[in-house]
Structures are given as structure tokens and as C-alpha cells.
């Protein structure tokens, strides 16, 4: 039987994901491949282009996230309290944070990160995320 879990996320340290983005791993599942994290993204930083290889959900806790150029360019601008679902297969060529932003994100599978010219770079799945977490230096609180 799998036990329920509880985390006081405020007491967990942020770790460096890279490129001005910090993360906290809340849950990973070898059984389903799902993983849940919090991301803290510094003003002006962005995720590398990526394709979702499993449906994902986010909830913006604070700040602003602009997907595909944001609302003004036909994409999405999500601010604190906003929720989004990202289906399996969706391509995010641009995910930009104009101000410091925190979000909750759970993904039911992996993410294929891409180079700037959209060639495969690396796959982030639950196992790679665990490796990342072990190796990632602590971020400034
Ligand atoms: Zn995405």
C-alpha cells in the first residue's frame, strides 16, 4: 500500500535547476512516471524550448508566465491563481517569465527539452529529475 504524503514546502530548500530557475521536487512516481515540482523563476528567465511527452498541469502561485509569446502574441499569459493543462505532445518554443514567478507543476510523463533550433537535447523524466535533485546545488533562499 502506498502511504499518503505531506510536505511543508516552505521548509524545503530551493535547488538550482539552471538558467535562473530553482525547483523543489514534491513527488516522483516510478510506477506512473508522474512528477510534481515547484518552480521559482527569476525575472527575465525562460525555459528552454520543450515538448511535453505527457499531459501536465500548472498553477501559478505568484508572478507571470508567458507561453508562446504571451497573450499579446496569441499565446497565453498566466498570472497568480491561473491554472493550465498542457496536453501530451504540445510544443512550447517559448516559456518566459517577465517577473519573479513561482508555479506548481505536475507532469504525467517526461518532457523533451530541445535546443534553440528545436533539435532534441535531453529528456527530463521522473528518474532524471531525481538525479537532478541529488546533484543540484542549493539556491539562495
Ligand atoms: Zn511546457
Image: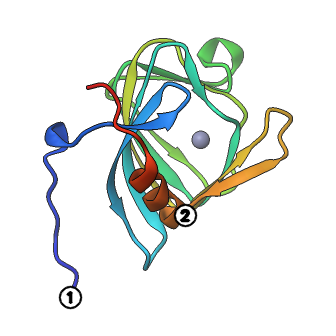
**Callout 1: 10 Å neighbours few (<14), some, many (20+)?**
few
Query: Do we see residue 18 in this rendering?
Result: yes
What residue do we see at 67% from left, 26% from top?
68
Residue 53 position, x and y percent, is: 64, 59
At x 55% / y 63%, what residue is drawn?
Answer: 109
The front one of 30 and 14 is 14
Residue 91 can be seen, yes or no: no
Q: As displayed, is residue 101 above or below residue 13?
A: above
Callout 2–callout 1 Cβ contact below 8 Å:
no
Q: Position of residue 49 (x, y in %)?
A: 70, 37
Q: What is the crowding at mark 2: few (fewer than 14 residues within 10 Å), some, or many (at least 20)?
A: some
| Mark 2: C-beta under 8 Å from nearest atom of ligand 1 | no
- Which residue corresponds to the image point at 46% horizontal and 75% vertical from the top-left? 32
- Checking the image for residue 109, the label placed there is 2
The residue that label 1 is drawn on is: 1
- Of the numbered discs 2 and 1, the one sitting upstream in the chain is 1
Question: At 16% from the left edge and 53% from the top edge, which residue is drawn?
Answer: 7
Q: Quadrant of residue 101?
A: top left
> Residue 66 appears at what percent x and percent y?
56, 22
| Above/below status of 44 relative to 40 | above
- Tag shown at residue 111: none
Q: CA distance from mark 2 to mark 1?
A: 22 Å
Q: Quadrant of the N terminus?
A: bottom left
Amino acid at each position: 500500500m502506498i502511504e499518503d504524503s505531506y510536505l511543508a514546502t516552505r521548509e524545503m530548500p530551493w535547488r538550482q535547476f539552471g538558467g535562473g530557475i530553482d525547483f523543489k521536487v514534491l513527488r516522483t512516481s516510478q510506477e506512473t512516471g508522474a512528477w510534481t515540482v515547484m518552480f521559482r523563476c527569476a525575472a527575465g528567465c525562460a525555459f528552454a524550448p520543450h515538448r511535453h511527452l505527457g499531459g501536465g498541469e500548472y498553477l501559478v502561485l505568484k508572478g507571470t508566465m508567458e507561453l508562446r509569446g504571451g497573450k499579446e502574441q496569441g499565446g497565453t499569459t498566466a498570472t497568480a491563481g491561473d491554472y493550465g493543462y498542457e496536453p501530451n505532445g504540445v510544443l512550447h518554443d517559448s516559456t518566459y517569465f517577465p517577473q519573479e514567478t513561482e508555479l506548481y507543476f505536475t507532469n504525467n510523463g517526461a518532457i523533451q527539452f530541445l535546443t534553440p533550433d528545436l533539435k532534441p537535447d535531453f529528456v527530463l523524466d521522473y528518474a532524471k529529475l531525481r538525479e537532478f535533485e541529488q546533484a543540484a546545488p542549493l539556491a539562495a533562499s
